[in-house]
Amino acid sequence: MNMKTKHILSLGSLFFFFFIFSSCEKVIDVDLEAGEEQLIVDGFITCFFDTVALSSGIENQVIKLRKTAPYFNNSSAAPALGAKVIVTNLLSNIPFEFKDDDNDGNYTYTGPFQLSLTNPPLGFPGSAYRFDINYKGEEFTAQNYMDSVPLIDSIKFIFQEQAIQGPDTLKAGYGIDQILSRGTNGSLSPTKDIKGEGTCYWFKTFKNNKFYNEPDEMNLAYDAAFGPGSDNVAFIPPIVFSLAPERFNIGDEIKIECWSIGLPTFYFLNLARTQMNNEGLFATPATNVPTNIVNKNKNSKVKAVGWFGAASVSYVTQKVK
Amino acid sequence: MKKFFLISFVSCLFSLLGVAQQKYTISGHVKDAASGEDIIGASVFSVESKLSVAANIYGFYSLTLPEGKHTITVSNLGYNNFTQVIELNKNILLDINLEIRSEQLKEVEITSEKSDANVKDIQMSVAKLDIKTIQKVPAFLGEVDLIKVIQLLPGVSTVGEGATGFNVRGGSIDQNLVLLDDAPVYNSSHLFGFFSVFNPDAVKDVKLYKGGIPSQFGGRLSSLLDVRLKDGNNKTYHAEGGIGLLFSRLSIEGPLVKNKSSFIVAGRRSYFDLFFPLSKNKDIRESKAYFYDLSVKLNYILNEKDRIYLSGYFGRDVFGAGNPEFGFDLGNATGTLRWNHIYNSKLFSNVSLIYSNYDYRIGVGDNFDGFNWKANIINYIVKPEFTYYLNPKNTITFGGSATYYTFDPGKLLFYSKGEKREIGSEPKYALENALYAGNEQRITGRLSFQYGLRFSNFNYLGKGTAYYFRDTIPNVRRDTIRTQTYDNFETIKSYNNLEPRFSLKFEVSDQSSIKASYNRTTQNLHLISNAAASTPLDVWIPSTNNVKPQIADQVALGYFRNFREDNMYETSVEVYYKEMKNQVDYIDGADLLLNKLLEGELMNGTGRAYGLELYLKKAKGDFTGWVSYTLSRSERKVNGINNNEWYPNRFDKAHNLNLVGMYTLNKKLEFGSTFAFGTGTPATFPTNRIEYQGYIIPHNIDGSRNNARIPVYHRLDLSATLHLKDKRSGKYKHDLVVSVYNVYARKNPFSIYFRGNPENPQQTQAVQFSVVGNIIPSVAYNFKF
């Protein structure tokens, strides 16, 4: 289900399901056919900015290569080993080779890093990237572009009473009221979407270094809201409130990362989120998520899945006081 | 092909002019003697000439007979026969009042039609339900619901409990034209599909056309559900009502001017929100959740030839919670003004002016932080219709309609920290015109035809912007290549369609007949919904330069047979095949709400549906009821989905079996039961998992759609009605209905989906979702005086 719909219908249906009768869910056994194994590409080229726009630009870049498994196989995905991985910054046309020295499927670039605008580092906003891989004789390629990201200066927490949300009771504690950015004159104002339609974001929240990793905690924004038409305004309350998936306590260390992911990646993640949580009366047809990994040999039947992304990332870390 | 139809149609019309002979016409209305209500479908029969005619939906009949003496018999199930001998030497106006047969008999009969209509009428693929029958079927939470009863008929199904609407012969829910006193109803549900908007106390007659649809009806592909409100008793005042678990109801009817004019006002409101203030929880105390509806009808007999009816419906669902308050309300409003005019004993006309509106509003917050979202569809319709009773062998219908539509497919105004933005699409406009003519022709006593032609002209109009998209790989979001703006009433795109209709009936014997039909239907309104069950947020859009009219061709063949002298048992077997063009489908991950580029998210496919329907009904006796069984398939083929192969629709069910039984033990006690069984609906199951950024995404390596089925559905419901007598006054009747839904508490699956275990997302699991997971008992109290 579309996120917009979900927000709205959850409220209405709440009353009914809650007061009148019992809709129910149960885990069942289903026999599934297993498909053949495929290569998964899982990685973002990143550029991290802290609260004062200091780009490290020198962080290690990692692309994970894994293999798909039968759906009910509950172990971690097996690594895809022995691939040759090159990422090219199309602005500078410099290729960077990613290597899997530990044989764990995590292909890493660890330097050297260049730090000049004429000769930009691997990860920098405004650059486009091409990803090339040779795996088991098949050559795949993908491209993406790194958008800019708004900087976040600080988080404004707010105390909230105990409340009912859906079937759950939220305990009293701190939620997030606003995220703030510092203007050129030094004043603080609510963080805005970057100007230009279709800049998209993935907000990640960490509490005491633990990432909120459930699919329905995946907080995506299209401009400042959920779709076109919300360009260059402050992120709307449903997005800001969702930065706190639960109520925090005093002393919790909260980190918020804002990943500027670009429109194609937004569509990919948005559909992935739906597919991982396709429940209820208004579920949409189950479908495969797209991939931007293309086999260079159009006649080859071997396909890869996953997504090659690029994101500039701003972050802020703050204790609840 | 079109030419062929035109020529044959015109030649049929000419063949109507029979041999001249001195004939006169007897005409008038058939009415209920006690209430003055028109009786729809009563049979008016001349014993001498063996000719008959059925009263139309306004109770009007016209029968042209040779000069001389005729014994006229008028019959209708549930009423005593009326017989009168007349000397026909001029045109005669004769209004007939039928007396209701004794109370006990009436209670056990389940339709108000004459008892052999299923065999003798030319119409096939039709289900007529009397409100009394509907009231006897055990109801969910004790709330009588005609849409739920319709779902127990052959050829009709639903995707699951709680899903709005119904599917007819493999068509989607937006392919049903639901009419309430001629006004289209765009969302026939309260509370997301759990209850229908029709108040049973105000409904007189329900008729569902699944095929062989006569030419006067058009606009949707799959069916017509024609719901008629009561006119109101024009002799005495009555009230009825009830208190159920969810609704309380009250209706009042009576004369405005005795024998000339009457009214009915019927209202319902849910009342569980009245208990909210008792809650200890502040959020619940401050919440709103209720729904209500009001049905009103007035009619006035101006003179022997003119009568006007005014009817209206207004209903809304309202929800609100939180601080600042989040509010959501939605509903339909319809209004119909009808004027019946009898030009002469052979020519009857009705002109309707109709208004219909479905809208919703969602809002939260204020002009600093908040939003306000609105969407609607509004219709203004003029519909003149004529019936010309040329002679007993030919009844000609002709007329037309013009509909002006305005669509607001959703606009959201929002404020973020004081800055205002607007999202969504601009309004759309359309004008739809239709002209039709048809004839029901009796060739011999045993063989009849009904044929007609409907012309539909649809214009997508300005003011507005037309979007033109790049053709790209199917199932990928299409880019806009250009836009063009249009002025008020400027035509952006027009579509013309001819819809031939043909039906045939051959009576093999007095109690058996064979019927066949072909019809083409077109549809220019499309409900944009890709969810399993349509949500109230789904919007309607017109055919545009990108969205073509849906077109269906259906053929059906049926055998109808009654058993026993008194037609105690009715049976039928029907087969149908239907092809549907320009079916709207959606790209994966389509964004359907508040998207001005929505048309770029749509795809176009073809559909086909076929099936076998068996029906056995016992209409009389202490024990009544029916068995319906449907074997069917409904499939779709869309480039870009399921590797361009046919795949079953989300609501496809191979087997669908319904048993409905009602038993009258004595004057005091009645029982009802329903058993429903259906094949599980299709679902898409994954084969593999993709681990990405720590998430587990399901993946089907073949890219197939609906490759699996959820488990079968079956459910038993029971009810008992205790009729209580008030000894002080014979007039006051009341009863207590105890019903149990889902008696053996089966957790019927609505869907199966796949997710990571919430405790450990790495571990994947399949989850079955049931809308109703329990036995649901209920009790209702009804009264009438």
Image: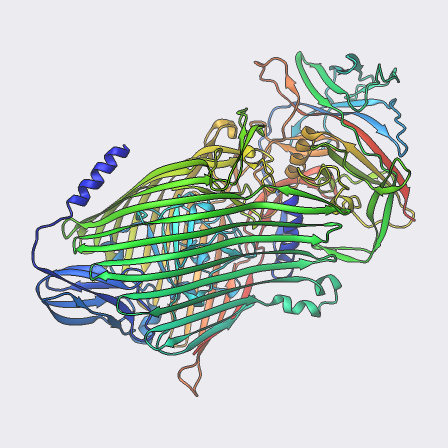
Image quadrant in which the C terminus of chain B is located: bottom left
Which residue is at the far front? B487
Q: Is residue B335 left or right of residue B389?
A: right
Q: Nearer the viewer, residue A78 or B112?
A: B112
The answer, for residue B359, to whether it is visible in the render is yes
Which residue does the image show at 39% across and 75% down from the upper left? B256
Q: Quarter of the image holding residue B192?
A: bottom right
Q: Tell me where residue A133 appears, x and y as whole percent.
A: 71, 15
Q: Where is B215 relative to B341, above or below?
A: above
Q: Tell me where residue B684 appears, x and y as whole percent.
A: 55, 36
Image quadrant in which the N terminus of chain B is located: top left
Q: Nearer the viewer, residue B510 or A229?
A: A229
Q: Where is B606 relative to B453, above or below?
A: above
Q: Where is A214 relative to B31, above or below?
A: above
Query: How is the structure coloured here?
Result: rainbow
Q: Tell me where residue A180 appears, x and y as whole percent.
A: 85, 42
The answer, for residue B608, to whether it is visible in the render is no
Q: Is residue B745 left or right of residue B230?
A: right
Which residue does the image show at 61% across and 61% down from the upper left? A20
Q: Quarter of the image holding residue B219?
A: top left
Q: Tell me where residue B605 appears, x and y as whole percent.
A: 46, 33
State how many labels appear: 0
Q: Nearer the viewer, residue B427 or B117?
A: B427
